[in-house]
Amino acid sequence: MVRLSLAVAAASTVRLRFFNLEPASSATLQARSFVFDAGLVRSLPGGGPVALHVGNHWCHGTERFLRLEIVQPVQCRFQRNGNAEEAHGPFSRIEAVDALLIADGEPFALLRGREWTCLRTQVAWPRVQFLIPPP
């Protein structure tokens, strides 16, 4: 019974991994979802900040990373005022290199100033959320 509960909990959380190739380093976080509020990454529930985009790096704790990734099925929701207004996916892989989000190998969104521009629709949004897709 405990194994089943752990498996269900793991399946309902998003794993976000920050990493550098050289020198090799990484940090992995888990949450129900992650919201990229302009250049600030928050974990939900709770909304606590976990990373900040500064220059061409993602800063997490005292470390700076060039890349981040989510390697599991996730849905992307662009938001304004806390409301999901544009949804995409599910995607099997999300990567961020500097301020460019890549979904399944294709450029998907770009952080310009304080907004994420969806490259599919050319609409700018203050937030983008990544969460497990509904069944």
Image: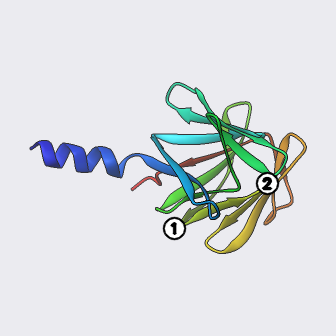
Question: Between 98 and 77, which is closer to the camera in this rendering?
Answer: 98
**Crowd class of label 1 (few under 14; some 14 to 19; many from 20; radius 10 Å):** some
Q: Residue 99: which numbered mark, if any?
A: 2
- At mark 2, the secondary structure is loop
Q: Could you tell me residue 132's position as x and y percent?
A: 46, 51
Point 58% across, 58% down: residue: 69
**Given the image, on which type of amino acid does mark 2 rest?**
Ala
Q: Could you tell me residue 83's position as x and y percent?
A: 67, 36
Q: Is residue 109 left or right of residue 60?
A: right
Q: Residue furthest right?
A: 113
Q: Could you tell me residue 10's position as x and y percent?
A: 33, 48
Point 52% across, 24% down: residue: 46
Quarter-of-image position of residue 32: top left
Q: Is residue 61 left or right of residue 31?
A: right
Point 62% across, 60% down: residue: 23
Residue that badge 1 annotates: 92
- At mark 1, the secondary structure is loop
